[in-house]
Image (cartoon, rainbow, N blue to C red):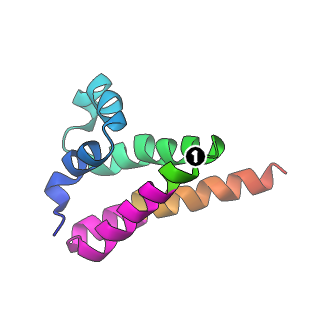
Amino acid sequence: MYEYNNAIDILVTRFPEMKTAFSINEDEYIGLPYYFFESEFVKFIIDSANNKDEKRLYEIFEFIEDMLSKGNEEMVNLLEVAVVESLLSQQTVAMRSL
């Protein structure tokens, strides 16, 4: 089971590229997984999409799906709010600019 208290550690372990983003602003992110996931993980997902990195996107969404199915209630809420809702709002902004 994925625990909310370990959310950032789980993410940076699964995607080592995220360690740099965390370490640069570690003081801002400690104890604030919502902030880290929304500001850094969502950016990582969008960058992967913009780069058309299908392999990376598959890994990302496989990871999210696994965390949603095996995470505690707080972890699921973190993903739904900080990631899914953020991606949907980014899509809405992009659609308005067309």
Residue in the foreground of this view, choosing between 22 and 58 = 58
Provide the residue designation for mark 1.
53
Q: Amino acid at mark 1?
A: Asp
Magenta stretch secondary structure, dominant: helix
Picture mark count: 1
Residue in the foreground of this view, choosing between 55 and 36 = 55
Q: Is residue 97 left or right of residue 40?
A: right
* On screen, residue 24 above or below 86: above
Q: Residue at 16% across / 53% down in the picture?
A: 6
Is residue 74 magenta-colored? Answer: yes
Q: Secondary structure at mark 1?
A: loop
Residue in the foreground of this view, choosing between 76 and 53 = 53
Q: Quadrant of residue 5?
A: bottom left
Crowd class of label 1 (few under 14; some 14 to 19; many from 20; radius 10 Å): few
Q: Position of residue 22 (x, y in %)?
A: 29, 32
* On screen, residue 56 above or below 77: above
**Quadrant in which the N terminus is drawn:** bottom left
Magenta residues span: 58-80
Q: Residue furthest right?
A: 98
Q: Position of residue 17 (x, y in %)?
A: 36, 34
Q: Residue furthest top?
A: 24
Q: Residue at 60% across / 58% down in the picture?
A: 89
Is residue 87 magenta-colored? Answer: no
Q: Residue at 48% across / 48% down in the picture?
A: 42
Q: Position of residue 74 (x, y in %)?
A: 23, 67
Q: Position of residue 49 (x, y in %)?
A: 60, 48
Q: Quadrant of residue 96?
A: bottom right
Q: Quadrant of residue 68?
A: bottom left
Q: Is residue 50 left or right of residue 13?
A: right
* On screen, residue 13 above or below 54: above
